[in-house]
Amino acid sequence: MTVSDNELYILGIESSCDETAAAVVSGDKRILSNVIYSQINEHKQFNGVVPEIAARSHLEKIDLVVQKALDDAGIEISDLDAVAGTCGPGLIGGVIVGATFAKGISLAADIPFIAVNHIEAHALTVRLTEDNVEFPYLLLLASGGHCQICIVYSTDNFEVIGRTLDDSVGESFDKVAKMLDLGYPGGPRVEKWAENGDDQRFEFPHPLCNKNSMDFSFSGLKTAVRILAERIFSDNNTNQDQAKSDICAGFQQTVAEILAYKMNLAFEYCKKKQIIPNAAVIAGGVAANKRIRNSLQLLCDKYKTRFAVPPIPLCTDNGAMIAWMGIEKFRKMQFTTLDFQPRPRWPLGL
Ligand code: KG4
Ligand code: ZN
């Protein structure tokens, strides 16, 4: 099947966490539509994503979101060349909703179905949004569900060189926000509060940063925040808002330092293995954080390597990244049979 890039249209469907999303993307990198329904208001009162509520909400919204994505793109189902759906990893109830809907479209329109690994889609989004990001490149994937460093050798060859031993980096932002009663989702709240904070007032641990390992651990850092938060909340003589800002600033700075330390090791690993990364990329929701982006930019300057970050709305979960992964797979004729089972856990490249 040969289709020229400007005539190749793929619908991507995403439902692995708390966003119901769909988009139509063309082979020549046009995002014709990108519709996202966020469930934030449904999960807010619980300070986190409740899987059962998420699955029901995906089911309620998916047909409307997909229809809007087609309408916004001015595309009929019959114009599509394939439909790509997130099939994992993620909250399985939601994944099943999106994957089954995508399979249904594939059957109804008689077009190929492409099962997409959500993390691989985050990893490759930069090739949709930036020109000439060639393989191999270094990737820091920093989201709510994942925290890992890998070398991306191709669309289906990833070497994971560092991973978290406990929480993901986004999760640690969310938990810190919860401890400080800042609301949900935590990452943007912590960043906002940090703007008025002194990042030097409190000292925080840098777990696993005295080791030559690219693995992460955030639980010690989280405990340090919890202890500080308890102290502050029980002390009526402390300016609590200022203390919260100072904790957020110190925590955020510490995370930026940890990520830069690990990425520095990743650059050194590449050097030792004589791999020349074409770029260093950060993807996932945490890439929205300016302090973290700045510290990685400095590191890339040191290694004279291009630093590439997708635009923030495409760093967090969206349908365009799934559609793009569909395009990358379509070009390799990597279609999926309809008996493919969604996977709550799905390692990269397998
Ligand atoms: O990629 P994403 O939208 O969903 C997952 O696949 O997990 O990432 C969401 C995560 C959340 O943990 C959120 O708190 C974090 O990204 N996040 C941020 C910021 N914006 C979102 N973390 C730090 N600073 C931000 N500005
Ligand atoms: Zn994600």
Image (cartoon, grey):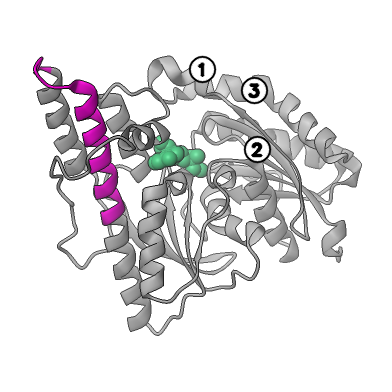
Q: CA distance from mark 2 to mark 1?
A: 22 Å
| Disc assigned to residue 42 | 1
Q: Which residue is mark 3?
A: 59
Task: Give amino acid for label 3.
Answer: Leu
Q: Which residue is mark 2?
A: 99
- Answer yes or no: disc 3 within 8 Å of ligand 1: no
Query: Which percent across, then down, holds residue 341?
Result: 59, 42
| Disc assigned to residue 68 | none
Q: Is residue 66 magenta?
A: no
Task: Give amino acid for label 2.
Answer: Ala
Q: Magenta span covers which residues?
A: 234-257
How crowded is the residue under tag 2: few (<14 C-alpha within 10 Å), some, or many (20+)? Answer: many
Query: Which percent across, then down, holds residue 131?
Result: 65, 66
Q: Secondary structure at mark 2?
A: helix
Q: Is residue 252 magenta?
A: yes
Q: Quadrant of the N terminus?
A: bottom right
Residue drawn at (27%, 48%), measured in percent from left and top? 253
Which residue is at the far bottom? 274
148 to the left or right of 105? left
Circles 3 and 2: CB distance less than 8 Å? no
Vertically, is 307 above or below 284? below
Please name whichever residue, 133 or 171, is drawn nearer the observer in this view of the structure. Answer: 133
How crowded is the residue under tag 1: few (<14 C-alpha within 10 Å), some, or many (20+)? Answer: some
Residue drawn at (81%, 40%), measured in percent from left and top? 107
Circles 3 and 1: CB distance less than 8 Å? no
Q: Secondary structure at mark 3?
A: helix
